[in-house]
């Protein structure tokens, strides 16, 4: 049973790596923002909110046209 | 859960990934030939097919053979693949690693990291494990079948991760 737990842990680690790609690819962009304490933080925002197409393979100019 | 069980899990993933990669290269060796030539290695369709056949046999033996030699060969093959990806990254002349035949696979840091992790994982089993992995996991039992199923899913996830090298 311990072997199954170890295998599932490895699978979950890989799943997180793949899901991270899927979530970031799915029409979102990362915007750097300033926090009140002056620190810089990355904020994930919807691409349409910042004028993008939501399609990372499509140039912004083409989307605007 | 011990380190040995994690290294066994990584060995199962490495072996299944190697079998899948070997089978795809047997069917379409061309992209592997081009990738090898890009780093100055001599290659041909027949040589890649022969290497793929050996890759499949070594990977299967690493799972079912009680000998440590097959696991050593599997670790060495992932070490060689890590060196190949590092060389390809340095020359920058090929994008497709050719690992998965016509299915594609990109050369990049992800590929380098995955190969290195699997090499270390397989090598770690040499320190503590004796006997066949298939026997100790008891593939005939329910939990053994579940370990194999999770291993197959993990190998597919690893291939997917490498295939999206350009993603953030």
Image: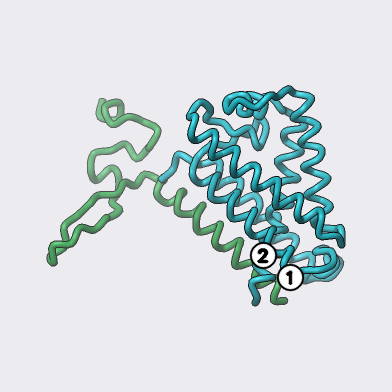
Chain colours: A green, B cyan
- Seen in the picture, residue B52 relative to B76 is either above or below; the reply is above
The residue under the point 68% across, 55% down is B13
The residue tagged 1 is B128
The residue under the point 54% across, 61% down is A13
Q: Is residue B148 left or right of residue A46?
A: right
Image mark 2: chain: B
Say which of B22 and B39 sits in front. Answer: B39
Marks 1/2: CA–CA distance? 10 Å
Looking at the rendered structure, the secondary structure element under dot 1 is: helix
User: For residue B104, which quarter of the picture?
Assistant: top right
The residue under the point 19% across, 55% down is A33
Q: Is residue B93 left or right of residue B99?
A: left
User: Tag 1: Cα neighbours inside 10 Å, few (<14), some, or many (≥20)?
Assistant: few
Determine contact: label 1, label 2, CB under 8 Å. yes
Instruction: Measuring from the top left, give residue B63's x and y in whole percent.
Output: 80, 57
Say which of B91 and B138 sits in front. Answer: B91
Q: Are marks 1 and 2 on the same chain?
A: yes
- Seen in the picture, residue B162 relative to B46 is either above or below; the reply is below
Image mark 1: chain: B
The N terminus of chain B lies in quadrant: bottom right
The residue under the point 80% across, 64% down is B133
Say which of B114 and A5 sits in front. Answer: B114
The residue tagged 2 is B7
User: Tag 2: Cα neighbours inside 10 Å, few (<14), some, or many (≥20)?
Assistant: many
- Seen in the picture, residue B81 relative to B117 is either above or below; the reply is above
- Seen in the picture, residue B115 relative to B108 is either above or below; the reply is below
């Amino acid at each position: 049973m311990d072997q199954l737990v170890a295998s599932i842990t490895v699978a979950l680690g890989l799943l997180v790596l793949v899901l991270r790609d899927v979530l970031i690819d799915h029409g979102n962009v990362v915007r750097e923002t300033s926090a009140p304490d002056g620190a810089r933080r990355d904020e994930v925002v919807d691409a349409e909110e910042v004028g993008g197409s939501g399609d990372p393979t499509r140039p912004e100019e083409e989307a605007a046209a | 859960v011990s380190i040995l069980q994690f290294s066994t899990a990584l060995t199962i993933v490495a072996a299944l990934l190697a079998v899948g990669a070997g089978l795809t290269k047997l069917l379409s060796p061309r992209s592997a030939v081009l990738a090898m030539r890009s780093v100055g290695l001599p290659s041909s369709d027949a040589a890649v097919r022969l290497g793929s056949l050996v890759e499949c046999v070594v990977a299967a033996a690493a799972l079912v053979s009680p000998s440590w030699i097959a696991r050593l060969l599997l670790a060495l093959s992932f070490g060689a693949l890590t060196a190949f990806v590092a060389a390809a990254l340095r020359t920058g002349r090929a994008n497709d690693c050719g690992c998965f035949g016509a299915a594609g696979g990109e050369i990049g840091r992800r590929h380098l990291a995955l190969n290195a992790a699997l090499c270390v994982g397989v090598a770690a089993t040499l320190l503590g494990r004796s006997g066949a992995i298939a026997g100790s996991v008891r593939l005939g039992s329910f939990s053994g079948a579940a370990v194999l199923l999770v291993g197959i899913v993990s190998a597919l996830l690893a291939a997917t991760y490498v295939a999206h090298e350009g993603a953030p």
